[in-house]
Amino acid sequence: MILYLCEKPSQGRDIGRVLGATSQREGYGEGPGVRVTWCIGHLLEMTEPDRYKPEWKQWRLDTLPMVPEEWKLELTRQGGKQFKIIQELLKGVQEVVLATDADREGETIGREVLERCGYRGKVSRLWLSALDDASIRKALASLWPGQKTEPLYQAGLGRSRADWLVGMNLTRAYTIVGRQGGYDGVLSVGRVQTPTLKLVVDRDRLIEKFKPVDFFDVIAFHRVAYGSFKAKWIPPKQHADDEGRCQDRTVAEAVVQKVQGQIGKVTKAETKRVKDPPPLPLELSTLQQEASRRWSMSAKRTLEVAQSLYEKHKAVTYPRTDCRHLPTEQFKDAPKILQAVAKSDPVIAPLIQSANPISRSSAWNDKKITAHHAIIPTAAHVNVANLSREEFLVYDMIRRHYLAQFFPPHEYDATVINTLVSSETFRASGRVEQALGWKQVLGQPKEEKDAEEGEDDQRLPHVLAGEDASIEKTELNAKQTSPPNRYTEGTLIQAMKSVGKRVEDPRLRKILRDTSGIGTEATRASIIETLINRGLLAKEGKKNLVSMPAGRALADALPHSVTDPATTAVWEQFLEDIANGSRSLDEFLDKSELWLHRLIGNVKKRQEMGINPFHGLPTMPAASLAGKGGARSSARGSDAQSASAPDPSRPCPDCGKPMVRRKSKRGWFWGCSAYPNCSATMTDSPGNVSSSAPATKTASGPVCPKCQKGQLVERTEKKGGNSGNRFLGCSQYPTCRHTQPIK
């Protein structure tokens, strides 16, 4: 029996269909001598710190850095059932064919399951980037030996373990320092998350520091034999800034007077027919950018909607793709897909009738296919009446980008006329539509329309070089430079993809370009969502993202090596070296640990010097208190929802630090501002902060018989079989751990 292990159910069904494994069982398909099963993405995830060592449960600087001696994985919440199915299927098989995605992540997803199950038999690799029948058959005919791609697994382990080291340790370190400074939120740090935060912080500060600069345009209205046009003055270099603008009003006014009523000469008259090909089909990030621009839809919501179209309605192909091209083998499916789309919605049927299904755009290109091809509609019957408004909008955009591939180029005539008037150069440009082509399917973005409503929108008359042009009127237009726009989720995703442009080192810049920047199609939306939920970024209006005080303080406090996207490029280069066998996983982790020790050491030194960059930060927004992952607890657990500022008049009975009034699902309570170093809490009565007083737990009890320093105070067991029972404990906990029953 041969077992094929795929990454997701849809992939398993496609491969199973070609293999003849069409008898459906729970969690797998079966055929003669073959079974096809699947993961559901990652069935295993990195273990939380407290599962390694009990002392790692509390967030304390003296336990950092946390470096596991032996790395562990745990089953995800949704993965347990499918993992057991795979575990049973592995018993007695002669060979496993790894059929997960053809990339580092896919290799890791499959190999970590085989490793967890203790499988030691033969492993082969099915390497394919498209799931049409022809591509699957071709890949099945040339299986690779498993050892050929095993180094990809080592690279995947390196990426996930180094991310754990950075995320878990630096998030704890800076959150602890933040709470010592009075900030109650989670200050999360990550290899991708932190450079993304820095992008927004830098953009916001650029906007705030921006000082508008005056500049002046001179417009001259020309009259020629067959009509008239307006042209803009081109300032000579000595009067132009770096952008070619004149900032000296006196000079511009002199030009107005100089050319008024004069007769100039046409020095250039050039018209070119421009053929603009259709934009490629969509990948996830472009889909998210367009949804943000058009409908202010968040990146996370766009992914959820696309996933629903894929899983629930079977209307589109796999959405978490970074590729905008299609395999050539799929071109033959175009008539069937177009017919299905036409049947699904009579509104779009006339456009499909105008399409040419044998016209092939540049979208079909095997050399540019990655692990998945572009998002396109499927040949399944889709009743658009069953789609929600958001689902229809996203589906419509996907199907129209696919349909545009079967339309001719958009054609227009672009004309440029240069004139010389009294030794001053003027330029006019215009465009005349000749053929709509694919624009009858996709239309024209509002931004492009707005841009064309200036000088480029005019219809220029027919002129010849050397022809006279008289100046009938001149205008002086005073303008100001504008600050850059704030990021939206869509433009931030684009900035994450193109972040390499900001890196000076050409080698690292190329790496980031080749790896599509920082983050992946599947993770960018969740990274932005995490930054918002943790109060480091916030939404301003419907679209704009702005950095919050905590986000700015964190970006400033972190070393450049953490906020710089070039660090990701260095990592990626090392991981690529692991994948091709020229360097080892151990070497990579050793270097990562050395770097981490330096970073944590710097945090501790600054703390010893009394430097805390988080003093005076405003109270964290309620939405940011429910942390996840490595920063799972924010106050007394993930149910904390709001908190006041530390109250110096209410000292903690355990450590003397000010208490903070917090709210959980069970109501208000008082907690130590030094949490998680000190976990003391007090109950609170209803009412406002000023009228509330601790109901229990004071430090006026008898002297501790063990340390003779603290007092015995009442506490409550929070876990185990004695949960809820009261007892006496030393107020010097955790320095003194003496407890005794209440008599």
Image (cartoon, rainbow, N blue to C red):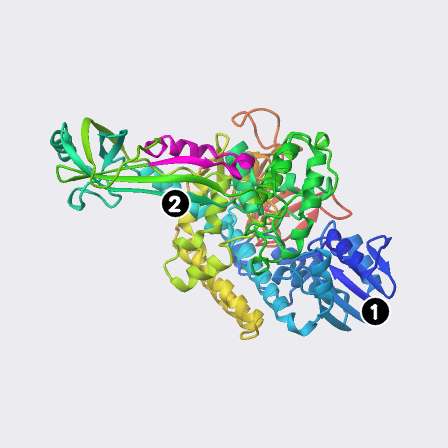
Residue 328: image location, x then y, percent: 63, 56
Could you tell me which secondary element the residue under label 1 belongs to?
Answer: loop
Task: Please tell me which residue is depicted at 66% across the width and 45% down the height of the picture.
Answer: 728
Does the image show residue 718? no
Q: Nearer the viewer, residue 718 or 355?
A: 355
Q: Amino acid at mark 1?
A: Val
| Residue depth check, mark 2 versus mark 1: number of the one nearer the observer | 1
Q: Amino acid at mark 2?
A: Asp
Q: Going from the N terminus, do you reach mark 2 or mark 1 first?
A: 1
Residue 628 magenta-highlighted: no
Q: Is residue 532 left or right of residue 150?
A: left
Q: Nearer the viewer, residue 548 or 214?
A: 214
Determine which of the numbered discs, if any, sits on residue 93 in the image: 1
Determine which of the numbered discs, if any, sits on residue 412 in the image: none
Determine which of the numbered discs, if any, sits on residue 202 in the image: 2
Magenta stretch? Answer: 430-457
Could you tell me which secondary element the residue under label 2 belongs to?
Answer: helix
Q: Is residue 573 left or right of residue 21?
A: left
C-alpha distance separating marks 2 and 1:
55 Å
Does the image show residue 238? yes
Residue 214 is drawn in which quadrant?
A: top left
Eyeballing the image, is 623 above or below 44? above
